[in-house]
Image (cartoon, rainbow, N blue to C red):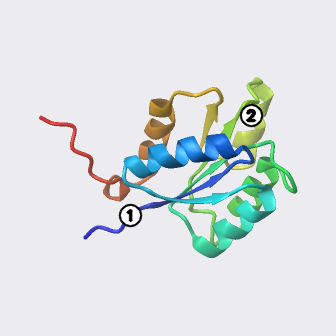
């Protein structure tokens, strides 16, 4: 059996965590969660997920700081990070790129957009096979 790919979702809004987690689980991913930046950083370092979906506006440590620290660390720099935020200014996305983020998804979002980014950042062998009929 193929091992499920693990995604760490870091967001301080429980309703978003619940909705996104359910959608990812339906797609065949294992979802780890954290509700603040510090917990997200620790979870990323200890759990070594295959991908991280990271909100920017978080308690204890913002998403830019978490992203920068993870991308600076040799043990976690390979993990793709999607910044997931309501901050829609061009400068916010530029800051995300500067701290090493691999993609940027604005809230409100379409789940297919988020799933598309997830699939594009995971190696093709890493995405669960989902039959859509032929």
Q: Give the residue displayed 26% in from the left and 47% down from the top.
A: 130
The image quarter in which residue 55 lies: top right
Q: Quadrant of the N terminus?
A: bottom left
Residue topped by disc 1: 4
**Where's residue 128, x and y in %?**
32, 54
Q: Give whichever of 50, 19 is nearer the camera.
A: 19
The percent coordinates of residue 4 (x first, y second) are 38, 63
Mark 2, secondary structure of its residue: helix
Q: CA distance from mark 1 to mark 2?
A: 32 Å
Q: Which residue is mark 2?
A: 94
Quarter of the image for residue 92 reads top right
Q: Which label sits in the foreground, 1 or 2?
A: 1
Q: Tell me the residue at 71%/61% (across/down).
A: 40
Going from N to C along the chain, the mark reached first, 1 or 2, is 1
Image x and y of residue 2, in percent: 29, 67
The residue sitting at 68% across, 46% down in the picture is 14
Image height check: is 94 above or below 102? Answer: above
């Amino acid at each position: 059996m193929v091992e499920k790919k693990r995604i760490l979702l870091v967001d301080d809004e429980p309703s978003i965590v619940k909705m996104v987690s359910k959608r990812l689980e339906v797609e065949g991913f294992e979802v780890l969660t954290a509700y603040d930046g510090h917990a997200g950083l620790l979870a990323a370092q200890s759990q070594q997920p295959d991908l991280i979906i990271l909100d920017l506006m978080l308690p204890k440590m913002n998403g830019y700081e978490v992203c920068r620290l993870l991308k600076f660390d040799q043990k976690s720099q390979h993990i793709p990070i999607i910044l997931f935020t309501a901050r829609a200014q061009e400068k916010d996305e530029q800051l995300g790129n500067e701290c090493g983020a691999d993609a940027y998804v604005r809230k409100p979002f379409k789940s297919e957009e988020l799933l598309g980014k997830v699939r594009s950042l995971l190696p093709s062998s890493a995405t669960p096979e989902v039959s859509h009929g032929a």
